[in-house]
Image: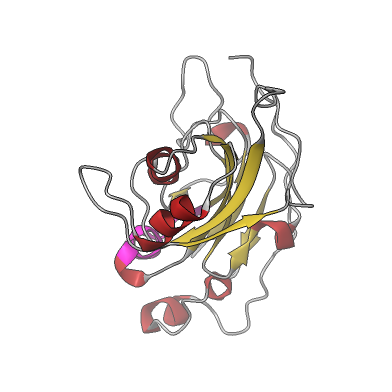
């Protein structure tokens, strides 16, 4: 069983098949047989997990298993307490209502890399970083949540999934490393434990440096 953590760059597609104008996972991950467990939109950045095991892939992506995903969103404006309460209690997005989220206003993450290109700067409109922890993964969910609360997301980074933390791995955009599946925090599952050799040493820092961004 293979489990890979990738820092997905901005504008990269979460797929291995070729795209006519954008980079794909094949531009930086050269491990055969792995596929993303869940997705990140092209305009979102950060942690993406890949595996060659179908059961693990489903378990990571399925909200039933309560694998918490933590995001940092740079939003337009300064969210007030009413907006934060809405995000924390669940947001009706029309087609579904989100589960309650853990939400807080935070300083700009110290570990954050520069985005290329950067977000558009507006001198008259401040921006704020908020941290959100959710257990779902609907299409563009975090962006839709903050927009519904009145504060559109300008930049979105997924920082962690379960016990795997991107800042702790020190991966820059386009870099990846191989992990022991037990680092996810799902080792209580008998199927996963059985497929992981007890004596296996996780190759946590086998980082690959091959990604070059493409013009869009």
At 74% from the left and 51% from the top, the residue drawn is 207
Q: Quadrant of residue 197?
A: bottom right
| Outermost right residue | 110
Q: Quadrant of residue 215?
A: top right
Magenta segment boundaries in residue numbering: 49-63
Taking depth in this image into account, of 184 and 195 the one nearest to the observer is 184
At 39% from the left and 55% from the top, the residue drawn is 86
Image coordinates of residue 141 in percent, x first then y, are 38, 45
Against 40, residue 63 (above or below) is below
Image coordinates of residue 213 in percent, x first then y, are 67, 24
At 68% from the left and 75% from the top, the residue drawn is 201
On screen, residue 178 versus residue 59, left or right, reads right
Magenta-colored stretch includes residue 62: yes
Image coordinates of residue 209 in percent, x first then y, are 75, 40
On screen, residue 186 versus residue 72, left or right, reads left
Query: Which scheme is used to colour this image of the protein?
Result: secondary structure
- Residue 51 visible within the image: no
**Quadrant into which the C terminus falls:** top right
- Residue 166 visible within the image: yes
Against 206, residue 128 (above or below) is above
Image coordinates of residue 85 in percent, x first then y, are 43, 59
Against 191, residue 78 (above or below) is above
Taking depth in this image into account, of 66 and 76 the one nearest to the observer is 76
Against 48, residue 13 (above or below) is above
Determine the main secondary structure of the stretch shown in magenta.
helix
Magenta-colored stretch includes residue 122: no
At 70% from the left and 32% from the top, the residue drawn is 115
């Amino acid at each position: 069983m293979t489990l890979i953590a990738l820092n997905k760059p901005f504008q990269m597609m979460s797929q291995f098949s070729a795209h006519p104008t954008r980079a794909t996972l094949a531009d930086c991950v050269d491990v055969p047989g792995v596929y993303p467990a869940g997705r990140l939109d092209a305009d979102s950045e950060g942690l993406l997990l890949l595996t060659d095991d179908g059961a693990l892939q489903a378990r990571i992506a399925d909200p039933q298993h309560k694998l918490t995903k933590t995001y940092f969103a740079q939003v337009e404006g300064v969210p007030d307490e009413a907006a934060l309460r809405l995000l924390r209690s669940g947001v009706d997005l029309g087609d579904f209502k989100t589960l309650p989220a853990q939400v807080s206003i935070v300083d700009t993450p110290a570990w954050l890399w520069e985005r290329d290109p950067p977000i558009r700067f507006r001198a008259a409109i401040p921006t704020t970083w908020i941290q959100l922890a959710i257990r779902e993964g609907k299409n563009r969910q975090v962006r839709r949540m903050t927009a519904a609360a009145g504060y559109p997301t300008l930049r979105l980074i997924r920082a962690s999934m379960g016990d795997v933390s991107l800042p702790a791995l020190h991966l820059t955009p386009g870099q990846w490393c191989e992990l022991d599946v037990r680092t996810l925090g799902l080792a209580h599952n008998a199927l996963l434990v059985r497929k992981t050799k007890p004596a296996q040493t996780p190759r946590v820092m086998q980082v690959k440096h091959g990604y070059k961004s493409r013009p869009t």
